[in-house]
Image (cartoon, coloured by chain):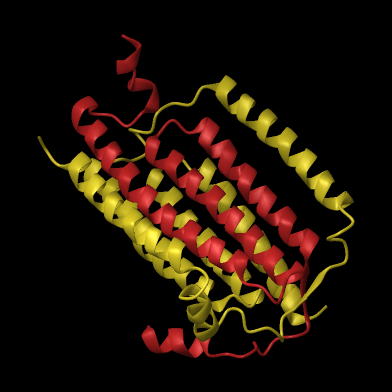
Chain colours: A red, B yellow
Amino acid sequence: MIELLFHITAFKSLPLGEVGGALTHIIILSTALFFIGMYGLFTRRNMITMLMSIELMLNSVNINFVAFNKYLYPDKMDGIFFSIFIIAIAAAEAAVAIAIIINLYRTHKSIDVDDVTDLKQ
Amino acid sequence: MAITEIIFWFLSALAVISAIMVVLSKSPVHSVLWLIAVFFAISGHYVLLNAQFIAIVNIIVYAGAIMVLFLFVLMLMNLNKETEPQKNLWMKLTGVVSGGCLLIILISLVRQATEIKGKIAVTKTGDIGLIKVLGKELFSSYVVPFEISSVLFLSAMIGAVVIGKKD
């Protein structure tokens, strides 16, 4: 695995053609992924799948950052670092959220968001 | 049609179809597996965009760590198709309408934007994805956010342990 990592990251350039997709196409892709995630967040009632939808939305934002960095400012690296920090924060967020979900499952015996209505009373 | 274009369209179709399957599949375990497919497709996009380090980190962190965490939690709770909460039809309709409206607005905006029209990435040049360049930049101009994120990880770890432990 480590060797593969070094191998891939040591490429100065990929042995591919000149042109990838245009910037418009990749932004439309990330927009579609974002709203698929948003639909999942609205419709799923299972907390873990809601969390997965949030991860999907975070990833679509990451694509946007990297694409804008590559297409519009190829001499800077801010977009790459933003997506690295987004990945880091998403990992921390997933750990804390899963701890909360496990605790809720222990007390309520369900992970349906509609069952967690303790603050209502 | 160049080979990168074919790869681009294939990865895009894979990402969108797998993402739709994530939100539509009944079983949570299947959702997790489709989400892993989405992450691999997105990593392919990163490689096309010359961001090889992020592609590897995406696979290791997301598909390797976070998704395994999700799968273990699903297995611990013994979730399957039968325990999946029933969805309200109105909720589905609301999701489709709100998500679809915003999607249409954003896509029409993107198609009209003049600054980004006709921008084509050159996949052969640029070394912003390499570890050497990224590391130098990370430890010079991004050192403060880097250290702050280490504190964030520590607090998240302690928080997860404190919240998750039996009292």
- Residue B84 location in percent, x, y? 38, 33
Looking at the image, residue A4 lies above or below residue B24: below
Quadrant into which the N terminus of chain B falls: bottom right
Q: How many marks?
A: 0
The quarter holding residue A60 reads bottom right
Q: Name the side, left or right, on which B67 lies relative to B73.
A: right
**Residue, x 66% and y 54% (percent of image)?**
A30
Query: Along the line of sight, which residue is nearer the eye, B7 or B57?
Result: B57
Taking the spot 53% from the left edge, 41% from the top edge, the residue there is B24
Q: Indicate the position of residue A63 as horizontal and vertical percent values.
A: 62, 61
Q: Quadrant of residue B127?
A: bottom right
Please tell me which residue lies in front, A84 or B40: A84
The residue furthest top is A121
Q: Nearer the viewer, residue B106 or B41?
A: B106
Drawn side of residue B118 relative to residue B46, left or right: right
Seen in the picture, residue A33 relative to A73 is either above or below; the reply is above
Residue A121 on image: x %, y %: 31, 8
Which of the 4 image quarters holds residue B121? bottom right
Residue B41 in view here: no
Query: Can see residue B9?
Result: yes
The residue at 72%/61% (across/down) is A26
Judge left or right: residue B46 versus residue B2: left
